[in-house]
Image (cartoon, coloured by chain):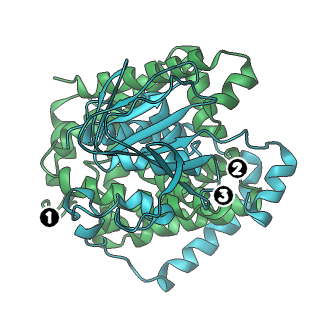
Chain colours: A cyan, B green
Amino acid sequence: MNPQHHLDPATLVSFASGALGEAMVAVAATHLVGCRRCRALLRDADDIGGRLLAQQQPDRNRQGRFEVLRKAMSERLDGVPLETSPQPKPENVLSVVPEDHLPEPLHRYFGTTYSGLRWRWVAPGVRLIRADNARAGSLIMLKIAPGKSLPTHGHGGTELTQVLRGAYDDRLGHFAPGDMADLDSEVEHQPVTIPGVPCVCVAALEAPLRFRGWLARKLQPLVGL
Amino acid sequence: MHSGYPAWEHSPFEALRAVSPASAQEKDVLYWAREMDAVATRRDRTSFMRIYDHFQPRVQRYLENVGAPEMVAEELAQEALLRLWQRAGSYDNARSSLGTWLFRIARNLQIDRVRREPHWVNVQDALEQLDEFENPGEASATEAVAAHCDLAGRVEKLPAIQARLIRMSYFEGKTHREISDEIDMPLGTVKSNLRRALLRLQVQVRGRP
């Protein structure tokens, strides 16, 4: 797999900073496990986070509390077991899994195999599965019949679409397995699937705004917002 | 991994320091790499406590910024530093600076424990394993350290608006849409600024001779 269409670097900044909702993370990660180029850029985005963390100025008013924490940490060091780095598990790596296996970031939402998917008819030539357990945004899989032209459409918010099988063409180019369409709300397009095989995609739509402010911050650890 | 260098004074960090006058950033990265090496190879508690003294308040502050209440941030910062002690052997200075390594640990803890999104840790594990397969031999530790230092300098020189959007992303955990609403900037402009910021840093790092 050698993707020709990639994640927007702005999306990678959100991924690295933890600002993407669960549905978007699932689709972005599906692309990342198959795209070395985007993984390299993600490492750079993580580096920005590391640099910003290092730049933080400690709060000098907390010196007393810090001494307490420091002592507690020092006392904990002897009691903890050391961890060796876990051996890479080949079954977790997309490139070596058998043909029927779904990419690992999708297992939690759609199961582990293509053959186990339970498609629902939504329109002639279009089948869909909606993941009901992705907590932020909507996460769907689409199967579109070969040689089918979808109506021209725009998107309410940002949408990420990763092609898993088959392919489609639109005015943005040819999208084959491994390719990512990272689309703005302004983009309108009319995908046409290639003849021969159905096109299977996974797509995430941006979540509604998260509630912010002091109350949400107090509630977050209690209700797991 | 440090195992190829039985004593740290023979490591590429020394070599780098020997051939080029170290910038403040290089000194910083080299200093922490050396302390981490002492923790990993000798279980050196003094080195660990130096790392703790420097990074614990910064990690805690980061966690509070992204929404963890004070007591939770305190607990997670302790856990992040304890993980550093436990997993020092798996820290690879060629792959990331110590700040980046701790940033990832703290971010992952926050998403797992405060936001309660267990999928995130699975995704991170899968990506890390892929990194382990492809990274060895890609760049020498010396080049990697130089790249981290370079990036550190570039982050500080970002144009003001890009720096602001980068901070809102990393330190307030805001989505593009939330940034757009908060500072009344069109969504497309938010994205293009963040895109330019990352590509600018990336080009500088990878464009090194």
Q: Position of residue A174 (x, y in %)?
A: 28, 27
Residue behind mark 1: B6
Q: Dot 1, how many residues are within 10 Å of its Cα: few (below 14), some (14-19), or many (20+)? A: few
Residue under the point 64% across and 50% down: A136
Which marked residue is nearer to the observer: mark 3 or mark 1? 3
Residue behind mark 2: B64
Q: Which image quarter: residue B48?
A: bottom left
Specify the subunit that label 2 lies on: B
Report the Cα–Cα distance between label 3 and label 2: 13 Å
Report the Cα–Cα distance between label 3 and label 1: 42 Å
Of residue B100 and residue B56, the one placed in the foreground of this image is B100
The amino acid beneath tag 3 is Arg
The mark nearer the N terminus, 3 or 2, is 2
Residue behind mark 3: B115
The amino acid beneath tag 1 is Pro
Q: Which image quarter: residue A168?
A: top left
The mark nearer the N terminus, 3 or 1, is 1
**Above or below, A27 relative to B129:** above
Q: Dot 2, how many residues are within 10 Å of its Cα: few (below 14), some (14-19), or many (20+)? A: many
The mark nearer the N terminus, 2 or 1, is 1
Q: Position of residue A42 (x, y in %)?
A: 38, 40
Secondary structure beneath label 2? helix
Which marked residue is nearer to the observer: mark 3 or mark 2? 3
Is any part of residue A31 visible from this angle?
yes
**Above or below, B190 relative to A4:** above
